Amino acid sequence: MGADRRIYLLTMPAIGQAAKTGDRTAVSGRTALRTLFEAGCRLLFKLYFGLIHRARVDGTENIPRTFERLIVISNHASLIDGILIWTYLKLPFKIIVDRRQAERILFRPFMRNRYTVPIDSMNPYALKEVVQWAKAGAPLLVFPEGRMTTTGSLMKFYEGTGFVALRTGAGVLPVYLKNTYGTFFAKKHPGRRFFAPVTITVGRLRPPISLDHLPRRMRKREATRILYRMLSEVYVEAHYRPSTLGREFVCRCRENRRKPLFADSSGSSVTYGKALIAAFVLGRRLALFEEANIGIMLPNLVVTALVFMGLQIFGKVAVFLNYSSGQAALRRAMDLADLNVVVTSRAFMERLRIEEDLFSGRRLVFVEDLKKAVAFRDRALALAESFLARGRGKADGDEHRTAVILFTSGSEGSPKGVCLSHENIITNVHQALSRIDVSAEDYFLNALPLFHGFGLTVGLIIPIFLGARSFLYVSPLHYRLVPEAAYGEGCTVLYGTTTFLSGYGRRADPYDFYSLRRVFAGGEPLTEAVFDLYAKKFGIRVMAGYGATECSPLISVNSALDHEYGTVGAVLPGMEWRLVAVPGIEDKEGRVGRLLVRGRNVMKGYLKSEEASLSGLADGGWYDTGDVVEITQGGALRIVGRLKRFAKIGGEMISLSAVEEALSEAFGDRMTVAVMSEADERRGERLIAVASSRSLDIKAVREALKARDFPDLAIPRDLLFMKDMPRLGSGKVDHVRLGELVRKQRAEGGE
């Protein structure tokens, strides 16, 4: 059956009736009238959607005109979703609807007709009719969520859709409806508008799902997960447009002028409207400097965020300086970025005990002076600009310019300057939002420093893109005060590394996190101890993610919709990945290897380091993460360890990270335990454990690892004591510095 399949399906019931009466002429007449009626309806709907909602369709070339079996899946945000897709895709759909909704008097005329198939979602046999229609060749329109979203994000996918996809062997066409949640046909929420623009994005047609390699009991769930990930990919296609962070900030502030945006622990707070004016004031002041790169050395405060966004509006490159890295590293970073201008604070420098001599030959701009220098004329000009300045639109290639320079943590080598473009960061924002269910109603608590990729993209920029609120806390090390801030502000989303989350969890009152609904961990492996602590004490499931500064930074993340414990989630949509076998490590039929990723979120390159850029970005733009991972049956990543943190002992590759994580789970609530390797004449290398408390002995270490089935080769032979472990700004142990201290300690004959 070819192109005429649509006409055949459209007239199938009428032809069956005509066969009984012999009156085929009447059937032809009714078919012609019906076709004319549908064409008229589509024309009227197009006029409405075009005039009122400025409807746009992307990806029309992906709509199949000939097919054997077809299922179209879409997100569901409003009452007009089915009509939109029927109008613009021009396929003779059978739309699957909930029988209970279809029985409502208001909905009955629209949901009880020849175009719909009402089913009882509580009846397991109800899908038989759906399967029969699909096998007969009728294209099905299915909303896998089974209801309209109440958050604007994707919600739970019902496994019935996965069952139908498997049983019918149909091709799958994912469609994403952007901003129908913003229309008056959505569930009631404050952001609805009468003239809200909508976009229909049609993804590429996917082949039938085949899961014969899985046990039968797992197939339906896995098929549903695959459909969810398909729609996540189209989400990114629907939302990404070439732009810059400055343009996006202007647009979000104009859309949400009266909504609160930033607040901090000093008592400062701004709305979106005031933030835009302040960003114009600060940005214009800093734009007077000829230098393209402007350094920022400030803690998490409202003014820090405004300085950053002001630089973005005026096309400057923000260079965040890691003030926790020490003066030598600061000096090297400033030299590497050719910084002649650094924005900082006198009070902050006094608190860090940094002398101005460190910045000899450079211009220091203090925020205290910037505030005093602002005159009425500056505010008036900024107010005018906030209404007139160019917002979202054609980027003219500006999206490829460097937006920010961040320095890698340097936990296993010298820090490198990572150049991230506007495209890199904006892409990663949409990739993250395709998976995590956060919305404009959330209140984010960000204590992670902005010189950290996690703190910048996820903690600062994502809330802006959502139109949400964000509370900026000055330091992640205030383990008692961060939970108090969460309690006092009523925050709903918290970010942190495992080290910081552990500190918060141990010191927080069980009610401090009463308002939190999502906690995300990144930067280092999420330990079982921290996961259990939050689950048992606060009733919160911590979601683990994984990334690298070079990837802006997110690579994968677990979410409430797609979660696999013990992993860091599936690779985000819009990214390709591949594994490279590592000699000495079993590849488990191609499921274990060194992870390489590629996508629009991968950095432009390293600052002033062609050699490092070439080693980090392989041919074709592949970024070598340097991490050895395992791909689970469900498609999630399980981190095996850093390639640089493997020791070859007796011919076997031993992951130092795995040993360290096991010891952290055993003793992490009382102390920090790090694991290192050193040369050994007999076995090549051997492991050393370093503990921050003398209460630990080598026997306890051996018993803890034996209990977790570690082989003898993975058990440290020595145990050293170091009260103050060197740490990075992310809270992770600084293994480079630790190694230097251990070697010094050994040379001096210490423990």
Image (cartoon, helix red, strand yellow):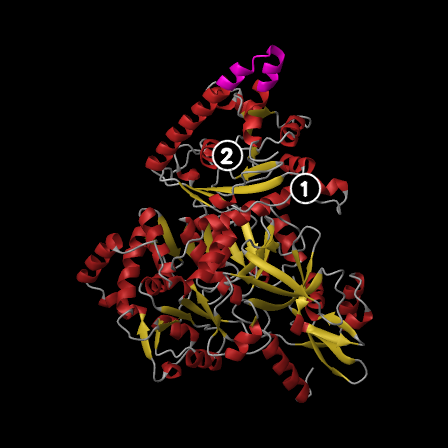
Is 96 in front, or is 629? 96
Left or right? Give the position of 688 relative to 90: right
Query: Which mark, by number, is residue 276?
Result: none
Answer whether residue 630 is visible to the viewer in this image: yes
Taking the image as shown, residue 351 lies to the left or right of residue 710, namely left
Q: Nearer the viewer, residue 39 or 431?
A: 39
Instruction: Give the x, y percent position of residue 292.
Output: 34, 73
Mark 1 neighbour class, 10 Å CA radius: few under 14, some 14 to 19, many 20 or more: some
| The stretch drawn in magenta includes residue 25 | yes
Cα distance between the residues tagged 1 and 2: 21 Å
* Quadrant of the drawing holding the C terminus: bottom right
Instruction: Tell me the residue at 31%/72% (across/down).
Output: 366
**Three-letter amino acid code at the position of disc 1:** Arg
Secondary structure mostly taken by the magenta-highlighted segment of the chain: helix
Which portion, as a residue range, is magenta? 15-29
For disc 1, the marked residue is 221
Percent x, y for residue 150? 48, 37
Task: Identify the residue at image location x=40%, y=39%.
Answer: 182
Q: Secondary structure at mark 1?
A: helix
Residue at mark 2: 148
Is residue 107 among what the camera can see? Answer: no
Secondary structure category for the residue under label 2: loop
Q: Amino acid at mark 2?
A: Met
137 relative position to 175: left or right: right
